[in-house]
Image (cartoon, rainbow, N blue to C red):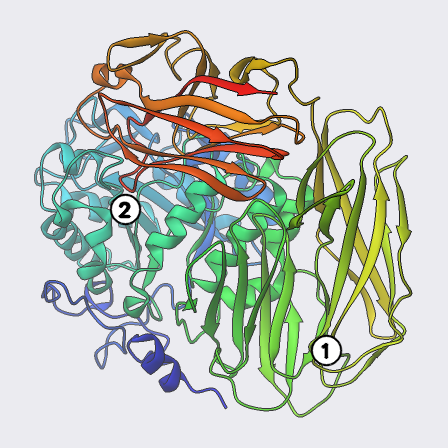
C-alpha cells in the first residue's frame, strides 16, 4: 500500500504531517530566515501556536484580471452576491479580494492612514468589509511592500507604514492581505527583509486579527529585466513559508483580460520547482484561475487540474458574472475541489520524464493518489503510467475520472486519451473489489493520404477529394474481458467513413485491438479544420475519444518557382502579435538582416510555427534566416533564435542558435513532402526581443 513516507523518499520532499496548522511567523513562530539555498521544510506549528487561517488552500475571487484597477464598492458587492447565488461561495470560493485600485489618487491622508477612493467607495473600506461579511464571505485587500512611488505603483506601505497599515487593515475587518513588490523593486528593497517585517506587523496587529498573508513578488528575469536571484519571485520559497500562507512563484500568469495557455504552463512549471516547502497552511502560488480570459474551455479545465494537483490556492481572476456554465461547472466540480482541498496538503510532483505528455501525481489523505495525465501538445495523445510508478501496491485499483465521473477498475495501467492542451485528472485507489474494466480508446490515427503512406498522426493535412485511412485502437486496462465492443466513427457532414474490418469479439485483460476505417473527403470541401472522433460501446459502458483533426489545405503551389511567403499558409503563429508577410513583426519595417533588405519573407516572434501544404508537388526550398536588425532599436537583451524546417514530421534542416548580425542560408530537397512546417524557437533564453525572419523563401513546384 501507498505511504506518505515512501512518496516523500521517492520525490525528495520533506515528510508532511496532517496537522492542520501553519508554521512560521504567520502562526506565531520566530522570524529567523531559512538557510540560504535550502528552504524551510513543512511541518507542524510550535506547541500553543494559533490555528492557521487557511489550513487547506484558500479559495475566492480577486479583482485584478477581470476588473482591472477601476472598480467600486457597488461592483464588488455585485460580484459578492453572484458568488453566493451561483454556488461558488458554498463550494469554498469565499474571499472577495480587492487588488490594486481601491485606493484614493493620494493613497494616504494627512493623518498618515491609507484611504479608499471616496467616490468609488463612499462608505469607506471598513463598511465594504462589513458588507462582504454580511454575505457570509471573507474580505481581502492589497498593498505593496515598497514606499509609495507615483508611476511605479498605486500605493505602498513601505517607508515606515508597515505597522500602521497592518493595524488599519485589521481594524477595517479584512481577513486577507496581498502584498505586492512593484514599489519594492523600484526602491531596490531586499524582498526577504521587507516581507518579513511586514509579516511581523500583520501578526502583531493591534486588533489581534488573524489575516491570510499572500506574499506577491512577481519580479522575474528576464520578463522584468536583469535582477539578482535574491530579488526574484523564484527565490521566495527560501523564506516565504516561514512568514506567509502563500507566496507567488513566478511573474503574473497573464495580462488584464488576456491569459494564454502557454503562460499557464510556464507558471505551473515554475511553481513545481519546490514542492517540499508546501504543507498545511503554506502554499506555493502559481497565480489566478483564468476562465474566459483567452483560453479555451479545455485549456481552462487543464489549468484547474494542474492547480488542484499542486495544492494551490484557487482564486478566480475573471469576472464571475461573465462566466458560461461550462466554466462554472469546472470551478464547482466536487471531486476536483476535494483533491485541491485534501487535508494532507502534499504538493504533486512529476512522475517520469518531462515532455509533450507527462504524468503528475499527488498523494491524498485516504491513501489514494490524484493523477494528472497532461498533454501539452497541439494534437490529442494517449498518456499512461502504472500503479507501481505511482507508489501504489495491489492487484486492483479503482479509477475515478473526476471530469466525467466515470468509475472503472484497472489492473495496474493508468491510461487516458487526452485532448490537445488537455489533462485527465484521475483519483486512483487500491481496492479488492472488481468493477467495470477500464477500456481506453485512442484518438483516431491517420496512416495514409491517397496512395502515399505517411507516419500515423492525429493531426493530418489533406486536400479536398483525398481518401484517408485511419484506425482506432482499444486498450483493456482492467482485469476482466471487454466483450463485443462496437466502434463507430463520427465524421463531418458530407464525409463518409467505412469500416475495413469487423469489430473484435473480445478484448482480453491487458490486451489491445485495432479497428481500421476508410474516410473520404468530398471534392469541393472548404479549407479549414475538421474533427474526426470515435466512440466505443460495450457492456462496460461507452467511451468517446478526443477528436483528431483533419486540416483541408489550400491548393498546393504550382507553376515553377513560387515565393512561399505570398502563398496561402495553412496556419501561422507568433509568440506575440501575428506573423507578418514581407515585413518585420511588430513594426512594419522591411525585413532587414545584417543591413541587407529582403523583399520577401515572414517576420515572427518566438515561439512560432508556420505551416504550408505542398501536396508532394515541390522539389526544392531555398532561403535564409536571421534576427531582424530592428532588435537593435529595442535593446541589447535577447535577440537569439533557432530555426527548423520540418517535412511530414521529419526535420529537414536546423539552424542551431542564430544571433544578431548574420543570415544563414539553406537549400533543401522537399521532394514528396506534403506538410511543411517552419518552426522558430527562443534558443533557450526566453522570447524577449526575439524578432526572427524567414527570408526570400522560394519553392520549386
Q: Which residue is mark 2?
A: 216
Image point (34%, 55%), residue name: 271
**Marks 2/1: CA–CA distance:** 50 Å
Q: Which residue is mark 1?
A: 511
Q: Quadrant of the C terminus?
A: top right
Query: In the rendered view, would you say 61 is above or below 50?
Result: above
Q: Tell me if mark 2 has few (under 14), some (14-19) or many (20+) residues whose alpha carbon lies within 10 angstroms of its own.
A: many
Q: Foreground: 205 or 303? A: 303
Q: Position of residue 579 (x, y in %)?
A: 47, 21
Left or right placement of residue 438 versus residue 216 in this view: right
Q: Quadrant of residue 450?
A: top right
Image point (66%, 17%), residue name: 558
Q: Is residue 402 visible?
A: no
Left or right placement of residue 552 versus residue 680 in this view: right
Element on which disc 1 rests: loop
Element on which disc 2 rests: loop
Q: Quadrant of residue 39?
A: bottom left
Amino acid at each position: 500500500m501507498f505511504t506518505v513516507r515512501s512518496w516523500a523518499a521517492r520525490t525528495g520532499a520533506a515528510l508532511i504531517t496532517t496537522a492542520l496548522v501553519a508554521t512560521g511567523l504567520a502562526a506565531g513562530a520566530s522570524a529567523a530566515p531559512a538557510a540560504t539555498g535550502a528552504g524551510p521544510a513543512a511541518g507542524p506549528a510550535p506547541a500553543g501556536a494559533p490555528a492557521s487561517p487557511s489550513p487547506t488552500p484558500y479559495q475566492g475571487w480577486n479583482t485584478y484580471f477581470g476588473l482591472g484597477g477601476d472598480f467600486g464598492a457597488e461592483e464588488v458587492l455585485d460580484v459578492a452576491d453572484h458568488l453566493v447565488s451561483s454556488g461558488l461561495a458554498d463550494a469554498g470560493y469565499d474571499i472577495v479580494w480587492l487588488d490594486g485600485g481601491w485606493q484614493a489618487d493620494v493613497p494616504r491622508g494627512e493623518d498618515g492612514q491609507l484611504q479608499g477612493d471616496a467616490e468609488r467607495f463612499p462608505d469607506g473600506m471598513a463598511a465594504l468589509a462589513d458588507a462582504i461579511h454580511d454575505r457570509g464571505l471573507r474580505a481581502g485587500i492589497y498593498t505593496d511592500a515598497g514606499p509609495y512611488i507615483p508611476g511605479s505603483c498605486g500605493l505602498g506601505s513601505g517607508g515606515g507604514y508597515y505597522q500602521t497599515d497592518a493595524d488599519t487593515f485589521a481594524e477595517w475587518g479584512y481577513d486577507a492581505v496581498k502584498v505586492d513588490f512593484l514599489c519594492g523593486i523600484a526602491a531596490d528593497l531586499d524582498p526577504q527583509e521587507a516581507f518579513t517585517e511586514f509579516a511581523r506587523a500583520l501578526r502583531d496587529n493591534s486588533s489581534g486579527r488573524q489575516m491570510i498573508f499572500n506574499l506577491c513578488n512577481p519580479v522575474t528575469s528576464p520578463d522584468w529585466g536583469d535582477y539578482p536571484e535574491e530579488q526574484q519571485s523564484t527565490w521566495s520559497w527560501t523564506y516565504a513559508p516561514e512568514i506567509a500562507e502563500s507566496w507567488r512563484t513566478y511573474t503574473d500568469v497573464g495580462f488584464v483580460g488576456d491569459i494564454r495557455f502557454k503562460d499557464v504552463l510556464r507558471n505551473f512549471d515554475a511553481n513545481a520547482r519546490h514542492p517540499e516547502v508546501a504543507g498545511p497552511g503554506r502554499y506555493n502560488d502559481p497565480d489566478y484561475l483564468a476562465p474566459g480570459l483567452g483560453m479555451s474551455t479545455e485549456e481552462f479545465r487543464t489549468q484547474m487540474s494542474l492547480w488542484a494537483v499542486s495544492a494551490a490556492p484557487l482564486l478566480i481572476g475573471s469576472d464571475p458574472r461573465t462566466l458560461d456554465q461550462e466554466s462554472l461547472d469546472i470551478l464547482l466540480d466536487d471531486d476536483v475541489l476535494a483533491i485541491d482541498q485534501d487535508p494532507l496538503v502534499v504538493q504533486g510532483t512529476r512522475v517520469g520524464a518531462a515532455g509533450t505528455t507527462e504524468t503528475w501525481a499527488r498523494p491524498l489523505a485516504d491513501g489514494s493518489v490524484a493523477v494528472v495525465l497532461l498533454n501539452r501538445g497541439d494534437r490529442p495523445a494517449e498518456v499512461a503510467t502504472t500503479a507501481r510508478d505511482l507508489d501504489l501496491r495491489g492487484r486492483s485499483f479503482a479509477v475515478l475520472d473526476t471530469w466525467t465521473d466515470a468509475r472503472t477498475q484497472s489492473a495496474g495501467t493508468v491510461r487516458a486519451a487526452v485532448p490537445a492542451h488537455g489533462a485527465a485528472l484521475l483519483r486512483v485507489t487500491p481496492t479488492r473489489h472488481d468493477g467495470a474494466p477500464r477500456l481506453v480508446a485512442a484518438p483516431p490515427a491517420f496512416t495514409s493520404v491517397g496512395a502515399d503512406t505517411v507516419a500515423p498522426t492525429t493531426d493530418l493535412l489533406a486536400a479536398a477529394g483525398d481518401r484517408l485511412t485511419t484506425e482506432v485502437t482499444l486498450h483493456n486496462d482492467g482485469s476482466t474481458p471487454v466483450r463485443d465492443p462496437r466502434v463507430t466513427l463520427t465524421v463531418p457532414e458530407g464525409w463518409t467513413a467505412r469500416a475495413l474490418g469487423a469489430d473484435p469479439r473480445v478484448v482480453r485483460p491487458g490486451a489491445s485491438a485495432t479497428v481500421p476505417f476508410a474516410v473520404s473527403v468530398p471534392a469541393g470541401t472548404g479549407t479549414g479544420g475538421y474533427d474526426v472522433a470515435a466512440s466505443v460501446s460495450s457492456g462496460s459502458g461507452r467511451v468517446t475519444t478526443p477528436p483528431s483533426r483533419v486540416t483541408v489545405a489550400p491548393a498546393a503551389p504550382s507553376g515553377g518557382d513560387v515565393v512561399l511567403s505570398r502563398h496561402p499558409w495553412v496556419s501561422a503563429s507568433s509568440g506575440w502579435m501575428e506573423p507578418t508577410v514581407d515585413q518585420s513583426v511588430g513594426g512594419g519595417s522591411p525585413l532587414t538582416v545584417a543591413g541587407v533588405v529582403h523583399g520577401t519573407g515572414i517576420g515572427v516572434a518566438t515561439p512560432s510555427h508556420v505551416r504550408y501544404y505542398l501536396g508532394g508537388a515541390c522539389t526544392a526550398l531555398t532561403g535564409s534566416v536571421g534576427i531582424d536588425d530592428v532588435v537593435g532599436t529595442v535593446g541589447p537583451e535577447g535577440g537569439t533564435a533557432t530555426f527548423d524546417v520540418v517535412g511530414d514530421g521529419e526535420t529537414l534542416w536546423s539552424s542551431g542558435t542564430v544571433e544578431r548580425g548574420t543570415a544563414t542560408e539553406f537549400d533543401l530537397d522537399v521532394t514528396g513532402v506534403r506538410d511543411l512546417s517552419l518552426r522558430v524557437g527562443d534558443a533557450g533564453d526566453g522570447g524577449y526581443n526575439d524578432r526572427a525572419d524567414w527570408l526570400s523563401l522560394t519553392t520549386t513546384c
